[in-house]
Image (cartoon, rainbow, N blue to C red):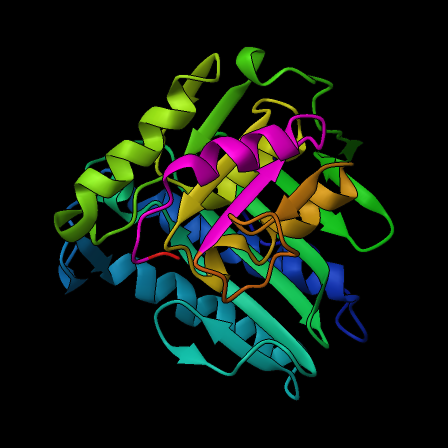
Amino acid sequence: MECTNAKIDPVRPSDLEVAVDAARTGAAIVFAALGSVVGTRFKGDANPVTDVDNQAEEAIIGLLRRFRPHDAILAEESGGTGWEEGRVWIVDPLDGTVNFIHGIPHVSVSVALWVDGQPAVGVIEDVTRHEEFIAQQGKGSEIEAAPINVSEERVLKNAMIATGFPYDRNLHGEAYAENLGHVLARVQGIRRLGSAALDLAWVACGRYDGYWEFGISPWDTGAGVLMITEAGGMVTNHLGKPYRLDDSGIVASNGGIHHDLVAAVGLAIPEHIK
């Protein structure tokens, strides 16, 4: 898949066509800039944003405004509306900004449509591998137009798990490390690659058996949660309750290891997360 604009129906494009075109538009901007020196500032400790984040987001929002002028938008850099009512596009224009700054080729673009608090469409573009993950409510998940499914692993000790670390690691690093240690002792392996959207997409296609993280935001998970459930998996918060985009923690899996993974994560939940 080339990271170029999709062919979109100029008269009445579907929501999926709009989402795909928006995600590809953002991915093309990110891909072109990877490895170059870009302007960077910090929104908070260890939480950078680059000019490319903003450029990709502006291009994505411009396309959404063109084809869905009456829909609301919630985007990482420019903010926006809530997500529980009406039609809301949720946008992460560059997931993996720290990777991007260091030239690490593991970054993504995530575009999702939520309708009345439920995910309807999700697209995640793996910018450097040129893999495109899509999901539609009730229609399954795909990569490059081929159906995908979660893994069949049922034993936690055999599972490959992904995670990430919140930006407030300077305040709560020891608590996160304790939590990590409990999970690490109970699984085959843990990977931390730096893009939550791709972590979720990789659970959906069976590369990972599960994933958990604290301190995530709606744009991190807006597309991925649909991708996993449509691929046959399960998504909850860190307490095992139905996941909401404003939850402080997420656990996603193939379903077979879910309850054991939630239990492992729950052995040492940081006090400030509870």
**Residue 247 location, x and y as percent?**
49, 61
**Residue 161 location, x and y as percent?**
49, 25
Q: Magenta region: which residues?
A: 249-272
157 relative to 131, above or below: above
Residue 8 in view, yes or no:
no
In the visual, does 273 lie left or right of 25? left
58 or 185: which is nearer to us? 185
Q: Please give the name of the residue rendered at 46% of the width and 81% of the height, measured from the top-left corner.
A: 80
99 relative to 49, above or below: above
Picture quarter with the C terminus:
bottom left
Specify the quadrant of the image occupied by residue 213: top left
155 relative to 204, above or below: above
Specify the quadrant of the image occupied by residue 106: top left
Specify the quadrant of the image occupied by residue 244: bottom right
Q: Please give the name of the residue rendered at 73% of the width and 44% of the height, measured from the top-left corner.
A: 229
**Residue 112 location, x and y as percent?**
62, 61
Q: Please give the name of the residue rendered at 64% of the width and 41% of the height, measured from the top-left corner.
A: 133
In the visual, does 254 lie left or right of 73? right
Magenta run includes residue 58: no
